[in-house]
Every structure is written in structure tokens, then in C-alpha cells.
Amino acid sequence: MGIRPTAVQALRRNTSILGDGRSIDCAVVFPEEDGAERHPAVIVIHEIVGPNEHIQDVCRRISELGYVVAAPDLFTGPLRRILTPTNIGLAMRSLSDAPPELRRDPAKMAEFAASQPSERRPFLEAFARVSAPNVQEGFTRDLLAVGQHLRALPEVDPSRLASVGFCFGGSMSARLATADPLLRAAVIFYGHAPPLEAVPSIRARVLGFYGSEDPGVTQSVPAFAAAMASAGKRFEYQVYPSAKHGFFNDTRPNYHRMSANDAWDRMVRFFGETLNR
């Protein structure tokens, strides 16, 4: 995909948004189009590594399609100092041999963290923390505040808002759909489903992308799809053969070009349909 920092920086506005009892950093990227037209908007929710260059590039690409894009840093504050790329790399080495379902159970993740070498515990404990339901509920309230900020911008059509997230952010995109009744669309890239009891509150159309070689996430998709169907909700999803977790991120070894390109095209069409772009 390629990073083009100058294209992002020229149209980027950094701001601070009052979220769930705290201020969170957020970058808002605007399309280059002139005129008084109000644009649809998309919240881009980062992976566990935060809003890095890959996320910035995703924001640029979406803004070039005519959307206003917000990229909040949900780890603003102490978590940002712990969840650095270097520290996450150490944690992933510990997790590489752990059961895939470990990431879906914060209590088991905390037990696992306690069993690891002391230098890895803070990062693994942070992993467990951001997976805890009460913490994710707080992140969801942060995202609701980001949505309110976007809807108040003069450049944004407040009736046309969507979200997309990757990994941790994919899970949060799903949770946001359960909490924001005005959200038009939610896209999930290899993120966990929201609590199934919250599915009936979803009003947005939901689109999911998963890898067949990512059992820790993908094996839970059928139950999510069944819950959505039972509640009369619209959920479309694609499981890509041979794709692993993080297949869309072209800066990582798991990048799978064919799957990533297809997912991008599907997402663009999906946003066009749901946001009337």
C-alpha cells in the first residue's frame, strides 16, 4: 500500500477528545475535495500496537475516497508507555505457543502472564487488561465520544458514520455497533465478536473479514453469525483460505496480498452502499 506521510499530514488535524473520563489523542484526516459538501465519516480503530504508520496509511486511503476519517488512540496514557512495538514483540513470543483461545479469556491471560518471565509480565498483563469486558466497555464509550466529535464537525454529515477496526480494533468496531444506534456500518478485520447478548441492539450493517489460519478468532464467527441472523441483523463475512491473523497489514509477515486486496474492494463497496457515497 505504501506510506505517504506528506499526503496525510497536509490534511490531518490532531486533537484531544474527552472520552470515558479522560482525554484521548485523535487524528482527523480530511479529503482533499473543496466545496461546502458534507462528507460521510469513518472511525478507524487501531490494532494492539496503536495508531502506527499502517493505520495512518489506511486513514489516508479511506480519506482519498471522500471520507472524513478519525483515528483515535485508545491507549492514550499509561497503556501507550507499555504497549510499544518492542514490548509487544516480546509478548507475542510468549503467546506464540499459547492456546489460541487464551486471548478470548482475560482471566486465563492474566494467569498466563503471571507464569512468564518478569520482564514480559507488564506487557502480557496489559494484553489481559485491554481484553477485559469492563475495560472494553470504557473503550466503547471513548469511541462514542469520537463519533460525537465527528458528527459535530462542519465537514461531516452526522447521519453517515461508520467504523472499521483491525485485530483489537476489529473487536472494538463490533462493540461500537452495539452501543451507537446511529452508526450506519461496522467493519471487523479479524476481531472478536461483541457479547452475543448485545447483538439485538445493533442497527448498523456489519461486514467481517477473517483468516482460515486464525482459529482463535475465526472459530467464533459462526456463533456470531447465528446470533445476528436470529436477531434479524445484517452480517456479511468472508473467511479467506490460507490467510492468518493480520493478513491486511502489509508491514507484517502475515500479510496476504490477494486476501487484503479483495477485502479492501469489498469494504469500499460496503461503505459506498451504507454511507451513500
Image: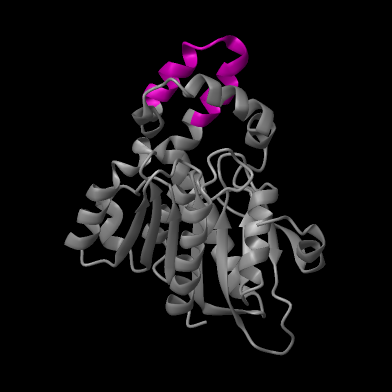
Question: What's the residue at 53%, 40% (across, down)?
Answer: 254
Q: Picture coordinates of residue 47 (x, y %)?
A: 56, 44
Q: Picture coordinates of residue 270 (x, y %)?
A: 44, 71
Question: What's the residue at 52%, 24% (across, down)?
Answer: 125
Q: Name the image quarter holding residue 231.
A: bottom left
Q: Name the image quarter holding residue 215.
A: top left
Give, as a single range, the part of the protein colored magenta. Answer: 107-127
The tally of labels here is 0
Residue 5 included in the magenta stretch of the image: no
Whether residue 125 sits left or right of residue 215 in the image: it is: right
Q: Which residue lies furthest to the bottom in this view?
A: 36
Q: Picture coordinates of residue 99 (x, y %)?
A: 36, 24
Whether residue 228 sits left or right of residue 132 in the image: it is: left
The foreground one among 45 and 245 is 245
Q: Picture coordinates of residue 220 (x, y %)?
A: 29, 43
Whether residue 22 sits left or right of residue 124 in the image: it is: right
Does residue 56 lie above or below 96 as drawn? below
Q: Is residue 232 visible?
A: yes
Quadrant (top left/top right/bottom left/bottom right) for the N terminus: bottom right
Question: What's the residue at 70%, 49% (across, down)?
Answer: 53
Q: Main secondary structure of the magenta part?
A: helix
Q: Is residue 176 visible?
A: no
Does residue 65 lie above or below 92 as drawn? below
Question: What's the residue at 42%, 47% (across, down)?
Answer: 191
The foreground one among 203 and 209 is 209
Colouring method of the image: one colour
Q: Residue furthest left?
A: 230
Residue 121 included in the magenta stretch of the image: yes
Q: Name the image quarter holding residue 71.
A: bottom right
The foreground one among 260 and 110 is 260
